[in-house]
Image: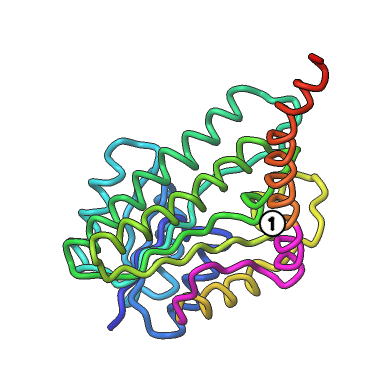
Amino acid sequence: MKKAIIIGATSGIGQEVAKCLLLDGWQIRVAGRRQSALENLQRAAPDQIQIQTLDVTQEDAGEKLNMLIDKVGGMDLFLLSSGIGFQNTNLNMEVELNTAYTNVEGFIRMVDTAFIYFRKSGGGHLAVISSIAGTKGLGVAPAYSATKRFQNTYIDALEQLSYLQKLNIRFTDIRPGFVATDLLNDGKHYPLLMDAAKVGRHIAWSLERKQRIVVIDWRYRIQGFFLEKVSRLDVETAARENQLTPKANQERNK
């Protein structure tokens, strides 16, 4: 029977994905900070769910993940669905730094532990939920956007490392747009808001097919396409300006 470990499945997108995997017959191992929420989830399918308290920002998180892997006899799929994000137009320093602490340091701690396990065990499927915000950034959420771009690039680099070391590890980077979860339950307006259950079904479908990059949904795929085009144009424009600058300086100095 297939075994999945999900970090952050006690609510939101991670919980919806867990429900879908349970219906497909997976054995689910769920880790998160809130013991009561973990126990509530376990009661839904006690024969299929095992739980472990874990905080990705703590130094012992990697050790606890390894303990969970050993306790349940390995894993085929690792899904990281844990992170934080805030609109922070006033650039509250504590908010920005805490966001980076969780979404960068905590992210590295978890995905590296999973990667090392899969390297030792002969392979597996490593998936993360990042965000469409990593494509170009959201002005109202600088740290969140930057950390999501970091996550995109980190998974790219791990995929390259896996290739260099001839490992049998598959990667999936899931990049949803705005989803109606507790994370966005702050009274602020979010455009193109998506239903969490629908997003969870899309993610489970994509994981089953081991898709490499998953942008949810089609509206955000269109946006992402044009944003990538704009990014490339920005780079090309900057390059042309750099090429022209020395000549322009020479003309001014004549």
Query: Does 217 sit above or below residue 136?
Result: below
Q: Give the range drawn in magenta.
A: 209-226
Residue 10 picture location, percent across and down = 48, 58
Q: In which quarter of the image is the C terminus?
A: top right
Q: Mark 1 points at which residue?
A: 228
Q: Residue at the far front: name it.
A: 254
**Does the magenta segment cover residue 220?**
yes
Residue drawn at 55 percent across, 42 percent down? 147
Residue drawn at 21 percent across, 61 percent down? 119
Residue 200 picture location, percent across and down = 58, 71
> Where is residue 210, by image quadrant?
bottom left
Q: Quadrant of the N terminus?
A: bottom left
**Does the magenta segment cover residue 217?**
yes
The amino acid sitting under disc 1 is: Glu
- Neighbour class for label 1 at 10 Å: few (<14), some, many (≥20)? few
Residue drawn at 28 percent across, 60 percent down? 164
Query: Does 163 sit above or below residue 103?
Result: below
> Where is residue 3, by image quadrant?
bottom left
Q: How many marks?
A: 1
154 and 102: which is toward the camera: 154
Determine whether, in the image, residue 48 is placed left or right of residue 203. left
> Where is residue 28, by image quadrant?
bottom left
